[in-house]
């Protein structure tokens, strides 16, 4: 068991809860994280999985570079070599990440061919060796994100075995996607929906490990549902729901404190409909400025706007908002103004609706 003080151990000791956005391949890149940070100050943001070999051999700035505004942000690594993962973790810490997380849950063909991700559920001793090596290499938290089992494993045995071993190796937290992964017969997309959820097992695991941070992931569609499902667990992690309906993130800070501070949330759920026009204008202005920086570095505004399409669900003007971001932003020479135009479609329609209601 870890004996060093981290924001995870503090959460367990004080009973405060942590909210995180999940690592999502092709989705949780630096542009999404900057956008998410405009909507929530308190969420712990995860990168998409980055393979340790890529970090050791590739363009590290392109792979690991991020904006300081994203903090707190956790780096998720993929791999199965303790030595390579330890070196990648060291590099990640040097880049300024707040946490190193090991992927033991992704079921994609890519990770199966490399024998990491969810495949590692079958090799708990190797996972423990990887955690121990990374723990020895860095001073920031080292954590694991896993499934409850794979294929014909008994989750009651497989999950407990993995958690026991990584706890002994010094993990600071375990985030559990409360589904099995079927490595044969189901696609990665099907693995996100078809295997049944077992929140009860995760709760039993927590009861057996009261001093270990255990967070819940999988099937959570809203903050209210997440809070109910969390119960006595230490945190919750939302993935696709927080991406496809990103307005969800505007309610996070009223219930979940910032993991790196002692702040106390209000305990009242809010949401996008409760934000003022001035609040939305601040989000707009921040994203317009950020998109300008991306373009100045050689990127395109569409690299940013593709992550923003899920905002404003249920708002008047949202159809035009999505059209501008999905179509106008991809045109040659498109610039940050498309973000302002998209927000204007919603804010003007919202204002007109409010005037009509008065």
Image: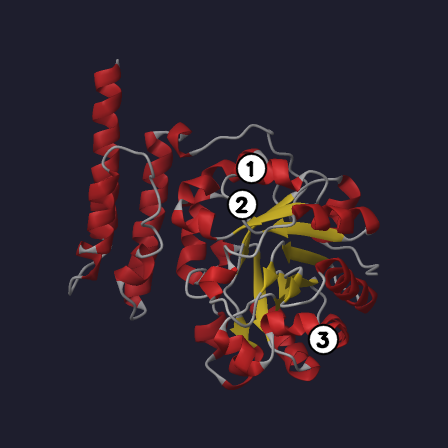
Relative side of 288 to 56, left or right:
left
The answer to whether any part of residue 96 appears in the image is: no
SS assignment at label 2: loop
Q: Residue at x 80, y 67 (%)?
A: 165
In the rendered image of this protein, does residue 196 appear above or below residue 86? above
Residue 358, image x, y percentages? 26, 13
In the rendered image of this protein, does residue 32 appear above or below residue 132? above
Residue identified by numbered label 3:
123
Frontmost residue, 92 versus 307: 307
SS assignment at label 1: helix
Q: Which mark is residue 225?
A: 1
Q: Residue at x 25, y 32 (%)?
A: 316
SS assignment at label 3: loop
Residue 110, image x, y percentages? 49, 77
The answer to whether any part of residue 182 appears in the image is: yes
Tell me where residue 134 sits by quadrant.
bottom right
Relative side of 109 to 215, left or right:
left
Q: Residue at x 20, y 61 (%)?
A: 330
Residue identified by numbered label 2:
220
**Label 1 to label 2, Cα distance in Å?**
7 Å
């Amino acid at each position: 068991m870890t004996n060093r003080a981290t924001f995870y151990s503090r959460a367990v000791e004080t009973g405060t809860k942590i909210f995180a956005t999940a690592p999502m391949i092709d989705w949780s890149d630096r542009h999404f994280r900057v956008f998410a940070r405009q909507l929530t100050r308190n969420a712990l943001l995860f990168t998409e999985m980055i393979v340790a070999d890529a970090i050791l051999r590739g363009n590290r700035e392109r792979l690991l570079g991020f904006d300081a505004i994203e903090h707190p942000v956790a780096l998720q690594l993929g791999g199965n070599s303790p030595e390579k993962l330890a070196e990648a973790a060291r590099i990640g810490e040097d880049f300024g990440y707040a946490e190193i997380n090991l992927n033991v849950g992704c079921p994609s063909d890519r990770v199966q061919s490399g024998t990491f991700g969810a495949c590692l559920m079958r090799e708990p001793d190797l996972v423990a060796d990887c955690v121990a090596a990374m723990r020895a290499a860095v001073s920031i938290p080292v954590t694991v994100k896993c499934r409850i089992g794979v294929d014909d494993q008994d989750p009651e045995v497989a999950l407990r075995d993995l958690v026991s071993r990584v706890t002994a190796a010094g993990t600071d937290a375990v985030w559990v996607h409360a589904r099995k992964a079927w490595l044969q017969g189901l696609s990665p997309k099907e693995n996100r929906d078809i295997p049944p959820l077992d929140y009860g097992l995760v709760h039993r695991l927590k009861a057996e490990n009261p001093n270990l941070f255990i967070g819940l992931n999988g099937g959570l569609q809203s903050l209210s549902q997440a809070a109910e499902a969390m119960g006595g667990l230490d945190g919750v992690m939302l993935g696709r729901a927080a991406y496809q309906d990103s307005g969800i993130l505007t309610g996070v800070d009223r219930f979940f404190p910032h993991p790196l501070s002692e702040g106390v949330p209000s305990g009242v759920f809010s949401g996008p409909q409760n934000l003022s026009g001035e609040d939305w204008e601040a989000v707009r202005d921040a994203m317009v400025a950020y998109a300008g920086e991306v373009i100045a570095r050689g990127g395109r505004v569409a690299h940013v706007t593709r992550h923003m399409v899920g905002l404003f669900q249920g708002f008047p003007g949202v159809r035009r908002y999505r059209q501008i971001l999905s179509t106008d932003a991809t045109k040659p020479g498109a610039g940050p103004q498309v973000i302002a135009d998209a927000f204007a479609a919603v804010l003007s329609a919202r204002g007109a609706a409010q005037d009509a209601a008065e």
